Amino acid sequence: MAGSHEEMAYDLALRSIGQQEAALDNLRARTGTLLSAASLSTAFLGALGLKDQALTGGAWIAVGLFVAMGVSSGFVLWPWGWIFGLDTYEVIEEYVDADDRPTLSLMQRDLAIHICLVSEHS
């Protein structure tokens, strides 16, 4: 069998980070599509519905829902600064340049734990 338990845990942690990043990208793409569709439908249907009328209760509800959808979409699309990976400088400083350099298997184990902890809080 190629690789140790630590290698397997490290590879699994890296794959989970990649899957989280892909899921967020997918969510953002779908949110952008939903926002575009809502904007188009609001523009066309709002113009037809309000052609010669003042805003009624139902129209105000529709406007409020559109604004709420836009704000909630903005929260998903805003670049919050999520981190999907490791800070290479910290890895080099902690493991490569350290006076008591750890073994490769200990390094992989520590990094796998670190990735899991970081991904839980991102």
Image (spheres, helix red, strand yellow):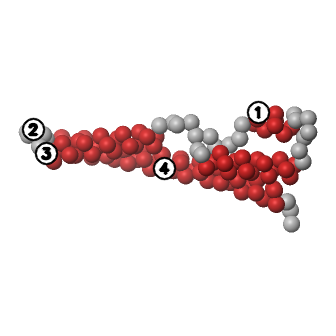
Answer with mark 3 or mark 4, whichever residue precedes in sequence: 4
Residue 33: image location, x then y, percent: 40, 47
Which structural element holds mark 4? Answer: helix
The residue beneath circle 3 is 57
Q: Residue furthest bottom?
A: 1
Residue 40: image location, x then y, percent: 29, 43
Residues at discs 3 and 4 in contact (Cβ within 8 Å): no
Q: CA distance from mark 3 to mark 4?
A: 32 Å
In the displayed structure image, the side of residue 32 where residue 37 appears, left or right: left
Q: Residues within 10 Å of mark 2 (few under 14, many from 20)?
A: few
Which structural element holds mark 1? Answer: helix
Q: CA distance from mark 1 to mark 4?
A: 30 Å
Which structural element holds mark 2? Answer: loop
The residue beneath circle 2 is 54
Answer with mark 1 or mark 3, whichever residue precedes in sequence: 3
Q: Which residue type does callout 2 highlight?
A: Ala
Residues at discs 4 and 2 in contact (Cβ within 8 Å): no
Residue 91 drawn above or below residue 29: above
Residue 27, disc: 4
Q: Quadrant of residue 42?
A: top left
Answer with mark 2 or mark 1, whichever residue precedes in sequence: 2
Answer with mark 1 or mark 4, whichever residue precedes in sequence: 4
**Front: mark 1 or 4:** 1
Residue 36: image location, x then y, percent: 36, 43
Q: Which residue type does callout 3 highlight?
A: Gly
In the displayed structure image, the side of residue 25 where residue 39 appears, left or right: left
